[in-house]
Amino acid sequence: MIAFFRDRPWIWIYVAFLVLFGAWTTLFTIAYKNQPEQIPLGQAAEQSQPGTENH
């Protein structure tokens, strides 16, 4: 089995690409499942107008 990879070093490029692809997929999956809470921008923009005082 070791001789197989030694005789075909280009296979390591595919292995490295698959590992990289798996790492990116894992990263995006974790980031998607742990998104920050959504804040409605319309309300926040109305409350924080410069030059106006909120009482």
Image: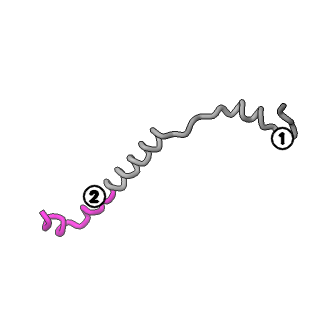
- Label 1 neighbour load within 10 Å: few <14, some 14-19, many 20+: few
Q: Residue at x 63, y 34 (%)?
A: 39
Q: Main secondary structure of the magenta part?
A: helix
Q: Is 1 rendered above or below residue 30?
A: below
Which span is picked out in magenta? 1-17
Q: In which image quadrant can residue 43 be found? A: top right
Q: In which image quadrant can residue 11 be found? A: bottom left
Q: Residue at x 44, y 45 (%)?
A: 28
Say which residue label 1 marks: 50
Give whichever of 39, 15 is nearer the camera: 39
> Would you say residue 6 sits in the magenta stretch?
yes
Three-letter code, disc 2: Val
Q: Is 10 rendered above or below residue 54?
A: below
Q: Is residue 18 left or right of residue 42?
A: left
- The location of residue 1, given as percent across then percent down, is 12, 62
Measured Cα–Cα span from mark 1 to mark 2: 55 Å
Give whichever of 46, 17 is nearer the camera: 46
Tag 2's secondary structure? Answer: helix
- The location of residue 27, given as percent across then percent down, is 42, 48
Q: State how many labels appear.
A: 2
Q: Is residue 43 left or right of residue 2?
A: right
Q: Residue at x 59, y 34 (%)?
A: 38
The quarter of the image holding the C terminus is: top right
Label disc, if present, on residue 15 of the rendered structure:
2
Three-letter code, disc 1: Pro
Q: Is 46 rendered above or below residue 17?
A: above
